[in-house]
Amino acid sequence: MTQSALIQGGAGGLGRALVNRILQSNQFDQVFVTARDIQRIDSTDSRVIPVALDLLSDQSIGEASVVVASHSDKLHLVVTTAGILQDDSLGLKPEKKLSDLTRSNLERVFSVNCFGPFLWYAALGRLIRHREPITVATLSARVASIGDNRLGGWHSYRASKTAQNMLTKNLSLELSRTNPQATVVGLHPGTVDTDLSKPFQSGVSPNKLFTAEQSAGYLWDVLNGLTAERTGQVIAWDGQTITP
Ligand SMILES: NC(=O)c1ccc[n+]([C@@H]2O[C@H](COP(=O)([O-])OP(=O)(O)OC[C@H]3O[C@@H](n4cnc5c(N)ncnc54)[C@H](OP(=O)(O)O)[C@@H]3O)[C@@H](O)[C@H]2O)c1
């Protein structure tokens, strides 16, 4: 039985490290790797199938799902890494206070972090709706936890990931009705040295800042140890469940 994995965002900091970790495991015959610009996917491994995907475009989502379906009829591991916190080209920064909110920044952050991943899963359709074991993991963040929020701020990023977590829970319930072997989770990677966190690393002690490879190793161990009882949860790099 062919085992297929799909990593969205495989040219990003964590995405790239996750692709390498997944290839090293030798558990998959095919590894679909998406990026907005597929020239940035640097793996030359013959199992890698590059797929162009921009989660802000319904057309791109539709076309990418057709490409995946032309190679495979079932996916067994789906990891989605898309995330934005800041974008200098758009003047987008994490908000410190309510008056920093703008509709355009809220829409952008929600579109990439929350709408995009779940419109992507909807487009994947039968590729994720089957009766074989499947794990669907979306990169979330500890700051999305309402119970753990003691600092406030970062309104659009936090709220987009909290909404993402709700969609994770909903998808977990939906898939479990027809597939008891489906596991749908959010993952918190820790604080990881990537482009996304670079502007915010000054207050992070060096032993709490992971390399992308370190975090991908931890996340791979979490994914490997998952059982369907944990479906719907958001799980941190160390295997702990994060309070919603
Ligand atoms: N780094 C941390 O400390 C940290 C902490 C908690 C959670 N996270 C989460 O971990 C995930 C990965 O982040 P990272 O640290 O690896 O940051 P990164 O290197 O900046 O990667 C961000 C990823 O998002 C993708 N992306 C952005 N806009 C997109 C769009 N319109 N369509 C498709 N993909 C898009 C990028 O794809 P392209 O390559 O195509 O640009 C890239 O793969 C994010 O969801 C982030 O929120 C990170």
Image (cartoon, grey):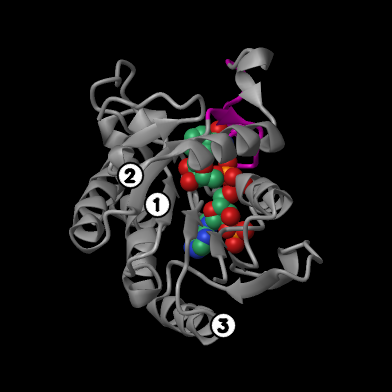
Mark earlier in primary sequence (2, 3): 3
Q: Which residue is mark 3?
A: 71
Q: Nearer the viewer, residue 65 or 174?
A: 174
- Tell me residue 199's x, y (percent): 60, 32
> Is there any visible trace of residue 60 in the rendered image?
yes
Q: Is residue 83 above or below residue 199?
A: below
Q: Which residues are magenta?
A: 190-203
User: How far is mark 1 from mark 2, CA to CA?
Assistant: 24 Å
The quarter holding residue 50 reads bottom right
Secondary structure mainly formed by the magenta segment: loop
Q: Is disc 3 placed on a helix, strand or loop?
A: helix
- Badge 2: few (under 14), some or many (20 or more) residues near its Cα, within 10 Å? some
Q: Residue furthest front?
A: 1
Residue at the disc numbered 2: 228
Q: Residue 165 appears at what percent x and percent y?
A: 29, 43
Q: Residue at x 41, y 81 (%)?
A: 62
Please name which of the two marks, 1 or 2, marks the residue nearer to the observer.
Answer: 2
Position of 116 with respect to 72 (left or right) is left
The percent position of residue 38, horizontal first and vertical second, equals: 68, 71
- Label 2: state its secondary structure: helix
Q: How many angstroms separate mark 2 from mark 3 (CA)?
A: 27 Å
**Residue 84 vertical position relative to residue 43 in the rendered view, above or below:** above
Q: Quadrant of the N terminus?
A: bottom right
The residue tagged 1 is 113
**Image point 68% across, 31% down: which residue?**
214
Residue 195 magenta-highlighted: yes
For the residue labelled by badge 1, is the local secondary structure a helix, a strand or a loop? helix
Q: Position of residue 54 (x, y in %)?
A: 50, 70
